[in-house]
Amino acid sequence: MLLERQGVDITLFDARSRGGGRLCTTDQGDEGGAEWIDGDHVRCLSLLEGLGLSPIPDANEPYLVAYKGERLLSAELWPEALEDAGRVHEEAAALCYDPPPAADATLSSFLDRHCRSERGRWWNEAQWRSDEGEDTNRIGLNGWLAGYRHYLGRPEGTMSAYRFPGANAVTDAMLARLNAKPNLSHSLARVASESGSTLEFASGETSGPYDALVLAIPPPCLGQIAFEPELPPETAAAIRRCPMGRTIKVSFEFAEPFWEDEGWHGHMFTDGPLQQTWNSSIGRRHLLSAYICGNDAESVVRSPDPIAIVRGELLRISARARPVRAVLHDWISDPWSRGAFSYTPVNPVDRSVLAAREGSIHFAGEHTASWMGFVEGALESAERVAAEITRTGPAL
Ligand SMILES: Cc1cc2nc3c(=O)[nH]c(=O)nc-3n(C[C@H](O)[C@H](O)[C@H](O)COP(=O)(O)OP(=O)(O)OC[C@H]3O[C@@H](n4cnc5c(N)ncnc54)[C@H](O)[C@@H]3O)c2cc1C
């Protein structure tokens, strides 16, 4: 959209048979992707406004906590867990602008150091595992602290303040405004860049040459594409070393929002493999989404009947949790993302090279942005790339 607004002729390709990538709402089809908009994700909010769409405001409270047989609502959360969360925040805020800690330090060891109670440690794991989409022992402390800067000085209630409107309204509205219609089911396999970039797809079809090429492709998929000439070794290494969180999402539909009668809003944390549910209700459809990350996600999807496991877990939380429909999307093996969203591992390579232009090839996507892992990051990268092409790129 940004490029078309500046008079650039564009051609769009996507490997999927639908538009929108990882932004797909749980009320549509079998996939559930990005759902939440933080109150300070200004690009997302202004995109919606420009499209004439409204974000769905959300409260997320009161939430339910089910831990070791205990069941409590947010107002009853253990004081020691809140103290531990407060200490983690203070220590992270103090470290954010200090010289970086050892490159092999993990978020998990940081939480171990600053949590003093067992419940507090679990509570902090639950919060940060969900934000990163991965167990905290895989998250590099350096990268996490860089992202944490975004959270400093945020008013309370900023996180997950809104939801994207349902029925994939954002993608549909964006596609309706574009002159270029996407060429779907086109999986890019090879890029030959001599004068401009020529594309070759898995089907053998070719297209181009194009003056400029924007690759907004998740790193594990980008790593499968052949480049001629090859990408510089530091770029190839950064793509290889940019992992994606192991996350699966299960959406449940219920005849009634039973959680309301039980005094919680649909948001729930549990120490079982279900990990967490969110209220994803849209209009009159009563939906909960379970968001399962890390080792638990892998063991659920590898089991012979993943849906039976999550249904059983739901029943452990409430005898009334009997969904009329349950769908699971395994983002870990989704061929067009190979994971949920990017995170910084221990001993990371220099991530800034992921965003560095290579001749006529421009790299976009959440993994190239400071708001890494969020739709906000994808939009941030779009602004950068549009500016690269229209201000400094070849004459178009
Ligand atoms: C379960 C889940 C929950 C999330 N929750 C949130 C949330 O609540 N809030 C939030 O802000 N973000 C969330 N995210 C992250 C958010 O979805 C992403 O950060 C964002 O959508 C990424 O946009 P992108 O354009 O970088 O990548 P994508 O949306 O993945 O787009 C990349 C496109 O590249 C295509 N592609 C891949 N390989 C090829 C190829 N070889 N040839 C051609 N095309 C190819 C894919 O089909 C895809 O359409 C979530 C993600 C997941 C998976």
Image (cartoon, rainbow, N blue to C red):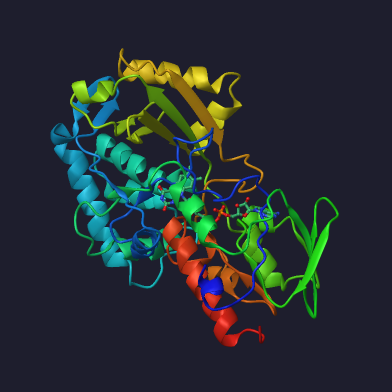
Q: To which quarter of the image does residue 122 belong?
A: top left
Q: To which quarter of the image does residue 194 belong?
A: bottom right
Please state if 224 lies on the left or on the right of 132 as rendered: right
Q: Residue at x 54, y 51 (%)?
A: 20
Q: Quadrant of the C terminus?
A: bottom right
Please state if 30 lies on the left or on the right of 93 as rendered: right
Please state if 141 lies on the left or on the right of 149 as rendered: right
User: What is the x, y in percent for residue 319?
Assistant: 31, 12
Q: Residue at x 59, y 79 (%)?
A: 389
Say if residue 344 shows up in the picture.
no
User: What is the x, y in percent for residue 371?
Assistant: 42, 62
User: What is the x, y in percent for residue 59?
Assistant: 22, 43
- In this view of the protein, which residue sits in the foreground, 324 or 290? 324
Would you place residue 322 above or below residue 147 in this image? above
Question: In the current view of this chain or complex, which residue is farthest to the top?
Answer: 319
Say if residue 11 shows up in the picture.
yes
Q: Residue at x 21, y 40 (%)?
A: 81
Q: Residue at x 13, y 35 (%)?
A: 75
Question: In the current view of this chain or complex, which residue is farthest to the right?
Answer: 204
Would you place residue 252 above or below residue 179 in this image? above
- In this view of the protein, which residue sits in the foreground, 245 or 203? 203
| Count of marks placed on residues | 0
- In this view of the protein, which residue sits in the foreground, 156 or 241? 156
User: What is the x, y in percent for residue 169?
Assistant: 44, 48
